[in-house]
Amino acid sequence: MYLLPQPEKAVWQDGKFFLRYKAGIVIDTRICGAESAYVYEYAKLLQQEIEADTGFTLGIRREKATADGGDIFLTCDTEKMSADKAAMEAYSLQISETGVRISAGAPAGILYGVQTLRQIIRQAGAVLPRVEITDAPKIADRGLSYDVTRGRIPTLAELKRQADVCSFFKMNQLQLYVEHSYMFREFSEVWRYNTPLTAEDILELDAYCRKRNIELVPSLASFGHLYEVLHTKTYSHLCELENSDKEEYSLVGRMAHHTVDVSNEESFAMVAGRIEEFMGLFSSKYFNICADETFDLCKGRSKALGEEKGVKRVYLDFLKKLCDFVMEKGRIPMFWGDVLLEKPELISELPENAVCLNWEYWSGVTEDNVKKLTEAGVKNLYLCPGVQSWNHLINRHSDAYQNISRMCRNAHKYHARGVLNTEWGDLGHIAHPEFSTIGQIYGAAFSWSDKPMEEEEINRAISILQYGDVKGELVSLFRDLADTECVNWWHAVEYKEKCQKDSDTCGINRIIFANAEDSEEDRDERIERNLNRNQEILDCLYEKLGGLPRCARKDVSAYILMGEGQKLLTMVGKVLYEVAQKRSPSYDGKELAVKLEYWLAEYSKLWRSAARESELFRIVEVISWYADRLREL
């Protein structure tokens, strides 16, 4: 029996409880007011799970009862309600031979007891093992930051699916990272090429999240990463780099530039207006102003200011101004801490309750940065690992496990306020959203509990709980498929953009292939090995389809499609490399172009199944460019 996150204490006993069709889900009459409405929602979640796993539709009722009549009893002692989040989310679950009892001091605890019971029923059906569980989170804030701006803007249904996964695995925060993909009133020039989120989308998602004990936190680029805004005719004069709006559009360039000119007071007015408009849509007490990677600061229009005050002082002054504005509006500011890591002592000048977000994505991450920030006196610290989705057709799940487990271990050791797992959409957001679910669950499991789990063990648990694979093999197959990658998406986009500026091969061996230091013989051997392994895993996934629940088959089919895409990119890279080396190509260019275009057609369907049209056209442009180049050979 697997439970994720692992409970603080679980005592398994002999005997079984038969969940019979005449049983009911009973809400204690002592639960009243707003708490009663929330607990009813949780009872409905449980009712739906039981129907899916047993075929029985248990009735929901309210009465003064005990869990000894074959029922599932939900009770909440509101007299014990606490302002402490961990205490509010604590629960106990007892399954005896005569009934089930979930008790807590607040509705949030009832929800998490229900989620644990759902996981047990998902594996045991109607015959449940006897157990006594007492559980509470080790880290107060456990969330996911999801990029909805640099390529892929999810449908509302997809965003609700993300919230459901968060809640099922006991996460209590969701952030949607936005640069330009919300329909700001005065910014039609910015979002006119997209299908942006609307006020109604945010309001509905916020209400949906609240019912699942999730705080939907606004996250808005407010300093750097404003390419789309500062690339327009209306706002280009507020860009730190002069005439940058006249440069040709670049997915790579979009990542690296476009910081606001802090020496121009109009910049703050523009940013503050966006913050105030966006803020009103959310019930959260937090507002993430981001302020990360301000690469261009003091290199253009504000250069004189930087020479006078120093770049870090200029940065801090503008950041403090943003924080003060957010606080004036009654919210708590959050900011990414990467720029101030060189001088963490400056953070003490920011508002005391501001939350510093420390992101680190290396699989071998150490505790150096969190130690530095803690010693500098940072009181509200989130550690932010990543699901390793960006720039890959399939998430690098093994790297995600290493990064997330280490960052969560550091969070426990240094008593961090929160863990915010991150998913980014660099260069058009190529990866399918569902692929981040595995990393999302890693973060949920390792932030709630400080109990370690080996990679194979948690992969087996996720395979069973999330995908219904009774053999527990699926997640490891997904991981191994990702590891057959030879050409990642960043390499593919970078090569295209450089070739468009320069007819030269642009160092194809360095750009296209990650291990450019390989000898030619080693590279050929590695490519062939990975292509063969890729096909072996795809065959295994095809074989597993028939034995999985229907709801999981679409996820597996997405991995199959993207695995095929990985294989095609490798073949394209190999042909281009061979031609550059004046070798005979291994594959016919025209035939490969056709395969690439058929794959693109299926990929477009997959995109539209979870996202609005948004920037699909940019993915189409990249793939089509490669198809045309193959034909030119």
Image (cartoon, helix red, strand yellow):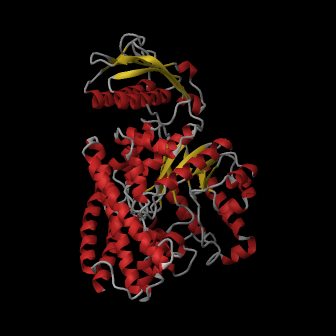
Q: Quadrant of the C terminus?
A: bottom left
Q: Quadrant of the N terminus?
A: top left
Location of residue 446 (image quadrant): top right
Q: Is residue 401 above or below residue 80?
A: below
Number of on-image labels? 0
Most foreground residue, 503 or 241: 503
Location of residue 548 (image quadrant): top left
Can the viewer see residue 6? yes
Q: Is residue 237 above or below residue 290?
A: below
Q: Is residue 568 above or below residue 304?
A: above
Give me the residue at 29% from left, 86% from top: 632
Give me the residue at 31% from left, 70% from top: 620
Could you say where residue 483 lies in the image, as x and y percent from the top left? 44, 60
Most foreground residue, 38 or 357: 357
Could you say where residue 173 lies in the image, as x and y percent from the top left? 50, 43
Q: Is residue 106 above or below residue 199?
A: above
Could you say where residue 9 lies in the image, as x and y percent from the top left? 55, 26
Could you say where residue 487 lies in the image, as x and y percent from the top left? 42, 70
Can the viewer see residue 282? no
Residue 586 relative to residue 130: left or right: left
Residue 551 relative to residue 95: left or right: left
Most foreground residue, 157 or 571: 571
